[in-house]
């Protein structure tokens, strides 16, 4: 049931690691962590000790032209 948003189970394919986000953007993993820490990209979900991004959040952010990237 990947369509569930609040407390429902997610498929692994719906969530991306920092490495997967970095590959999608063509940047290094350190850039992803820095941008997330600076609030320049969507924030990851905290799943226990793991941080993962919703693929839909990253895709939507890219489609909008990565709007927070100019902010520091």
Image: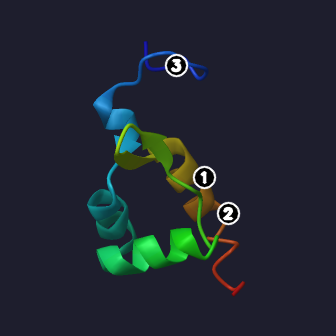
Q: Which image quadrant for residue 65? A: bottom right
Residue 64, disc: 2
Residue 11, disc: none
Nearest the eye: 48 or 36: 48
Residue picked out by circle 1: 60
Residue picked out by circle 3: 3
Can you tell which of label 3 and label 2 is closer to the viewer? Answer: 3
Q: Looking at the image, which residue sits at the far top?
A: 1
Q: Residue at x 69, y 74 (%)?
A: 68
Q: Which image quadrant for residue 70? A: bottom right
Q: Residue at x 59, y 23 (%)?
A: 5
The answer for how far apart the CA atoms under marks 1 and 2 are is 6 Å
Could you tell me which secondary element the residue under label 2 belongs to?
loop
Q: Residue at x 53, y 76 (%)?
A: 35
The answer for how far apart the CA atoms under marks 3 and 2 are is 22 Å
Horizontal side, residue 49 vs residue 38: left or right: left
């Amino acid at each position: 049931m990947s369509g569930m948003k609040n407390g429902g189970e997610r498929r692994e394919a719906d969530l991306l690691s920092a490495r997967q986000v970095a590959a999608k953007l063509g940047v290094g993993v350190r850039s992803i962590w820095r941008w997330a820490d600076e609030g320049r990209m969507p924030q990851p979900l905290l799943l226990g000790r793991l941080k993962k991004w919703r693929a839909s959040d990253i895709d939507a952010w890219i489609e909008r032209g990565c709007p927070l990237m100019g902010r520091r």
